[in-house]
Image: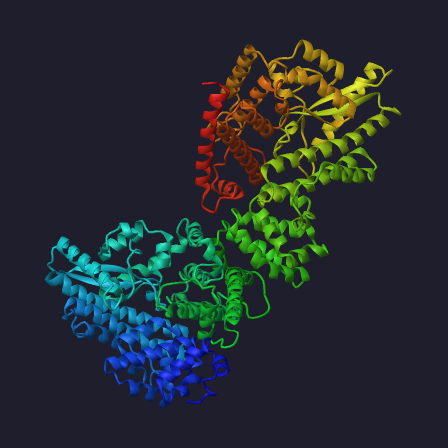
Amino acid sequence: MSRDATSKGALLRLGFTDPERAAEHVAQLGAGAEELLWTLGRTADPDLALQQLVRLRQAAGEQDADPDGLLAELVEDEGTAMRLLCVLGASEALGDHLCRHPDQWRELVDPTLGSTRPAAYAVREGLLRAVGADPADPTPTATLADHEALDAMRVEYRRVLLRLAARDLAHHLGVDDAAAELSDLAAATLEAALAVARQRVGESAALARLAVVAMGKCGGHELNYVSDVDVIFVYEPVEGAPPDQANRAATQLAAQLMRACSDPTGEGEIWPVDANLRPEGRNGPLVRTLESHRGYYERWASTWEFQALLKARAVAGDLELGRQYVEMVQPLVWTAAGRERFVEDTQAMRRRVLEHIPAKEAERQLKLGSGGLRDVEFAVQLLQMVHGKADEHIRLPTTLSALAALTERGYIGREDGVAMHDSYAFLRTLEHRLQLHRLQRTHVVPDDEDALRRLGRSMGFLKSSAAGLQDQWQRHRVEVRRLHQKLFYRPLLSAVARIPGEEARLSPEAARDRLAALGYADPSAALRHLEALTAGVSRAAHIQRALLPAMLEWFAEGPDPDAGLFGFRRISEAMGSTPWYLATLRDEGEVAQRMAAVLSTSRYATMLLEREPAGVRMLGEDLSPLGAEVVTEEMRAGAARRDDVESAVRSIRGVRRRELFRIAAGDLLGLTDVDVVGAGLSRLTDATLTAALEVVEDSVRRARGLEEAPTRFAIVAMGRYGGFELSYGSDADVLFVHDPVPGAEPQVAAGYAQAVANELRRLLSLPGGDPPLELDADLRPEGRQGPLVRTLDAYAAYYAGWSQVWEAQALLRADAVVGDQDVRRRFTEMVDPLRFPEGGITDDQVLEVRRIKARVDRERLPRGADPQTHLKLGRGGLADIEWTVQLLQMRHAGQVPALRTPRTLEALAAARDAGLVDEDDAALLQQTWRRVSRTRNAVTLVRGKPSDQLPSDPRERAAVASILGYPEGSSEAMVDDHLRHTRTAHAVVDRIFWET
C-alpha cells in the first residue's frame, strides 16, 4: 500500500473527514483497495462509502458471496466501482440492504445499467414472481407462505431500487426519468401486494373486480424515493355475485393490500398506502363502485378533490376498470374551474398547506415552504385547471411535462418556463438525495454541517459542499417565488398589450378565465383597466408592464382585487406624468405592496389617496400618527400663504386629509394599535381646530372692523373626541365657550363668538376633497334649543341651577383643548366638582343613570339592527362598556383621583387598581372595548362611510376580518369571536352597572 496515497493530506484532499480511520479501512481491504480512493472521493460521503464497503466485504465473506471477487471487480471495472461506491456513499439504508443480501452487489456489474431503463412490465413480472404469482394470470395470486411472500416482495423491491439508485447517482439520470421509474416500481409493488391480498382473502376474492388507481405523485408518474403512495380503490361485483358479498371481498382485498406494503417484517416495510383521497376521506368506505364514485363527484366533491383527480392513473388490479374510472372523472376535472367557490377553495388549499408547516421548519422546508416544490406544483395545476377546459394539450399529469406544455401553448413565457423547469428539477433532485440517505420520508433540509456536506457532494458540489448547496438552493427558492408570481400574472398583460420578448400570449378569453380563477369578480373590467394602464410605448406604460404582475398578485391577495386594480388605475391616471410616482413603485417594493394592500381593502383610504396621490410616498415612511404640534405648525404655514379664509381652511383640510391617510394606512397594515388610532385622530382634530380657529377669528375681526377680539374663545372636546377615542366616521362633539374681555359690550362679544362658531362649522363641513369635519354641539346646555355659544358665567349659572345627571355624565369626557388657555383652565375648574362630586352621585342619581341607559337600549337601536352585532349599542358593545366605566367614575372619582380622566381605558385601569373592578372583569372589558373599537374602525375603512353594524356583504365582511388580522376565509370565525367577546362583556356589565 502506498503511504503517499493514504497520507492524511491526500485523503483530506479526496474528501475524507477522518483520514486515520479511512487509512485503517483501506489497509483492512487489502491489496488494490487504494486504487478505489479516487472513485471514493467522488461519492457523497467518502468515509461512509469506505466504511460500508468494508462491511459489505465482510458480509460477502460470511454468506459465501465471493468477497475477493467483489474487490477485484471494483478494481478492474471503473463503472461497477462508480455505481456501487456512489450508492454506498449516498445511502446508508441501501448499504444496510446490501450487507443483508451481499450477493446483490452483482446487480451493479451490468454494463448496460447506465443506458437502459427497465420496462414497466418487466418490473411487474419480477415483483409478481417474487411472491410466487404468475404474471400471465388475469388475477395473479401469491403462492409463497405469507411471511415469505412479504419478505421476498421487500427484497425484490429494494433490488430494483438499488439498480435505480446506482443509475441515478453514477450516471446522472434525469430527475423526471428517476421519478417515472420509481412510479413504475410502486405500481408493480401494488400489483404484488394485491397478489398477496388475494391469497389472504381466499376464494371470495373472485367475487369482485378491484382496480387500484394511483393518485398524487405516483399517479402523475413522478414519485420520489420515499413517499406515501396515494390510491383510490374502485370495484365492481363479478357477474352473478351478491353485491354485499362483493363489497366485503373488495374491502378485504384493499385492506390486505395496504397491510402487505406497510407491515414491518424482518426486511422492513416498503411505504404506507394512503387511501384518504377517496370520497369522504377516511370517513368514507374504502372501496366504491364506479356509479358510487360518479354520484359523489357530481354532487358533493370539493375543488381540491378535482385537483387531486388530475393525476389519477390506473396502475394495478383490473386495469380496464381502472381506466373506466379515469375516463369518468376526467371531464369533471376540466370543468371544476367553473364551479362556485373555486377561487376561495384553491386559496384555502394553499393556506392550509402553509398553516401546517411548523415555524421552526418553515425556512428549511423543501416541499411546503415558500419557494418550494408545492409552489411549482400548485401553480402548474391551477393553470391546468383554469385553461385545460378549453385546451386538451395541457392535460398532462406529470408536473414537468405539464409545465412544458403550458409553455409551448403560450400560457407561460418561454424563458420563465425554462427557469421554472430548472428550479423544479433542482428541488426534486435535492429531495431525492435527502430521502435516499436513510430511505425515510422527509422534506426538511438539515442544518448540521456534516449532513449538508453529504447532500452538497451528492448534488455535485465537491468543493465548499455545504455552502455551495445552500447558495444554490436559496437561489432556486427565490427564483420559484419570483416565477410563481410571473406565471400567473405576467401573461395577463399580453392579452391587452404587446410586450417585447418571448412572453406568453394569452387570448382575452384565456386572460378572463385566469383573472376569474384568481379572485377577480369582473375579469372583463379588470382587462380594460390593464389595457388602459399598459397601452402605448411611453416610459410610463413600460414601467406599468413591469409593475403590474406583482401588483395583480398583491391585489388578488386582498379581499377586493377588483377595487384594488380600479383604484390603482384612477390614482395612476391622476398622477399623470409625475416623474417620481411610478419610479417609487418600481424601486421601492414595500411601497407598491403596501399600496396594493390598502387599495384592495379600503374604500376610505382609496378615496383619500385618490385626492392626495402624493400620499403614495408616505407608504414608504413611518406611518405612526404625527403629534398635534407638528401638524398645527404645518397647517398654520399653509394657511398663511392663502389670501382668503376659504382657501386657508381648504389648505388646513388638505393637511388633515394627508394625515388621515397616514393613520388609516398604518391601521390597515397592522402597524398602528387602536388606542394610537383614536389618539391620533383626536390630536389631528385638535390641530385642525386650532389652525382653523385662528384663521376664522382673524377673518371675523376683519369683517367686523375690529382691531382686537372682544372676547376670548375656546373649544371643549366632548364625547369620543374628548376621550381621545375618535374613530374615522365620528363627528367631533364640542362645546363653544367664550369670556368677554374687560370693557367689551356683551352683545358685541356674543355676536363675535356666535359668528366665529358658525363660520368655523361652515368652513370645516364644506364639500371638498376630504371627509368634512362636522362639529356637533348638541351636548351643550339645553341641547339644540339652547344658544350655540355661552360665556363661562352662563355655563356656571346653568350647571349650578339646571343641570341634570346626564349632563354631568357627558362632562366626564370634557377636555378643553383648543383656544384661549385661561378660558380652558377656568372651564375645567368649573366643571370638575360637577362631574367628580366629592361624595359621589346619590343613589337617586344612580337610578336615573340606569333609567336613561335602559331607555337608550330600548329606543336608540336603529330599526332592523341586530342587537347581537351592533357595535355601539349592541349587547356588550361600546355603549355598555363606556356607561359602566362612567358610572364608576361618577360614584368614586371624588375619592379616587386616578378616575378623573376622559379616557375609557385609563379610567377602567384606575377602577381596577382601586379595587372597584376585579382584574379578570377589567381585562375582559378592556379586550372587548378594544376589539369592538377596532372592528368599528375597520367597517368604516372598508365601506368608506361610518357604520355601527357588522357588514352583511361577504366581500366587505372578509375585508373587515382581514384588517382585524384573520386569515383568508375566516370571516365567520371573526363574527363568532365578536359574539363571544360581547356576550361575556355583557355579563360583566350586568354585574357592575346593573348590579344584577
Q: Quadrant of residue 443?
A: bottom left
Q: Quadrant of residue 780?
A: top right
Q: How is the image coloured?
A: rainbow
| Relative image position of residue 851 (x, y in whole percent) | 52, 15
Comparing 277 with 148, the one in front is 148
- x 35%, y 75%: residue: 165
* Quadrant location of the C terminus in the rendered image: top left
| Relative image position of residue 490 (x, y in whole percent) | 54, 62
Comparing 195 with 754, the one in front is 195
Comparing 132 with 441, the one in front is 441
* Residue 319 visible in this rendered orientation of the protein: no
Position above or below: 529 against 860: below
Q: Is residue 148 left or right of residue 341?
A: left
Position above or below: 956 against 204: above
Q: Is residue 97 left or right of residue 169?
A: left
- x 27%, y 49%: residue: 283
- x 53%, y 64%: residue: 478
* Quadrant location of the N terminus in the rendered image: bottom left
Q: Is residue 441 left or right of residue 630?
A: left
